[in-house]
Amino acid sequence: MTLAHFLDGLCCADCGAINVLRLDPLHALIECTKCGTSALIVPEIGKEIR
Ligand SMILES: [Zn+2]
């Protein structure tokens, strides 16, 4: 499973929109293309898995 696939169906924690998160592998961030919120990848994945 790729990170891009993981982002499918993930919703923004800030605005709640689904499938608007963009992966930024250079900075290890995911960014919401709707409200502009960004978050580190690792904590988001850890939160989703557990
Ligand atoms: Zn958002």
Image (tube, rainbow, N blue to C red):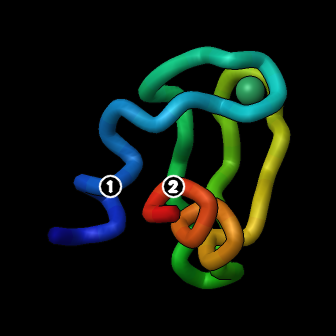
Q: Position of residue 19 (x, y in %)?
A: 43, 27
Q: Relative to residue 29, is residue 48 drawn left or right?
A: left
Determine which residue is flagged by label 2: 48
**Residue drawn 57% across and 71% down?**
46
Q: Residues within 10 Å of mark 2 (few under 14, many from 20)?
A: few
Q: Relative to residue 29, is residue 25 drawn left or right?
A: left
When asked about the image quadrant of residue 44, the answer is bottom right
> Distance from label 2 to label 1 (Cα)?
10 Å
Q: Is residue 41 above or below residue 48?
A: below
Of helix, strand and loop, which one carries label 1?
helix
Q: Position of residue 45 (x, y in %)?
A: 53, 66
Judging depth in this view, the residue of 47 and 9 nearest the camera is 47
Q: Residues within 10 Å of mark 1 (few under 14, many from 20)?
A: few
Judging depth in this view, the residue of 10 and 30 nearest the camera is 10
Q: Position of residue 41 (x, y in %)?
A: 62, 70
Determine which residue is flagged by label 1: 6
The amino acid on which the numbered mark 1 sits, given as a three-letter code, is Phe
**Residue drawn 53% across and 77% down?**
25
The amino acid on which the numbered mark 2 sits, given as a three-letter code, is Glu
Q: Is mark 2 within 8 Å of ligand 1?
A: no
Q: Please, which residue is most extreme toward the front here?
A: 50
Q: Position of residue 48 (x, y in %)?
A: 51, 55
User: Does the CB distance between marks 2 and 1 fall below 8 Å?
Assistant: yes
**Residue drawn 74% across and 33% down?**
13
Of helix, strand and loop, which one carries label 2?
helix
